């Protein structure tokens, strides 16, 4: 055999080892939860306070994206309003827009 053929065979063997390892891990993942019985949804051994705690933690986690998006949107909206107010103040001068409006009425 040539050196290149040996390397190909070694790579095939290492791939087979990886496939076997992945299969073993998948088998363990499927079998161990039945032994561990650590499922929070199981009705055995859960009291009312624990179930209520799971409920509120799920509600809290589900509301976070909306609260974060709403908070950032509000912040951006307020910053745009402040920037427009600053720009209007600069355009109208230090007296503000009311002073320029009264000047126009007197004419």
Image: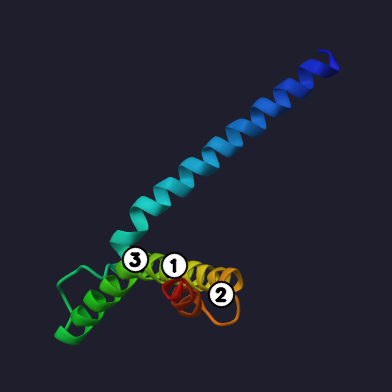
Q: CA distance from mark 1 to mark 3?
A: 16 Å
Residue that badge 3 annotates: 66
Q: Secondary structure at mark 2?
A: helix
Q: Residue furthest top?
A: 1
42, above or below 18, in the image: below
3, above or below 68, in the image: above
Q: Secondary structure at mark 3?
A: helix
**Residue at horizontal 49 percent and vertical 76 percent from the top:** 103
Packing grade of label 3 (10 A; few <14, some 14-19, many >=20) is: few
Earlier residue among tags 2 and 3: 3
17, above or below 45, in the image: above
Give the image location of residue 11, x and y in percent: 70, 28
Q: CA distance from mark 2 to mark 3?
A: 34 Å
Please indicate whether residue 12 sits to the left or right of residue 36 in the image. Answer: right
Residue that badge 1 annotates: 77
66, above or below 49, in the image: above
**Residue at horizontal 56 percent and vertical 72 percent from the top:** 92
Please indicate whether residue 14 sits to the left or right of residue 61 in the image. Answer: right
Residue that badge 2 annotates: 89
């Amino acid at each position: 055999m040539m050196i290149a053929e040996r390397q190909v065979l070694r790579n095939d063997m290492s791939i087979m080892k990886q496939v076997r390892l992945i299969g073993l891990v998948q088998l363990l993942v499927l079998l161990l939860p039945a032994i561990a019985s650590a499922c929070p949804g199981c009705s055995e051994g859960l009291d009312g306070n624990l179930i209520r705690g799971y409920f509120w933690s799920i509600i809290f986690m589900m509301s976070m994206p909306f609260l974060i998006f709403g908070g950032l949107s509000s912040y951006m909206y307020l910053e745009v309003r402040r920037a427009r107010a600053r720009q209007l103040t600069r355009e109208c001068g230090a007296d503000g827009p009311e002073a320029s409006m009264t000047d126009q009425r007197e004419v």
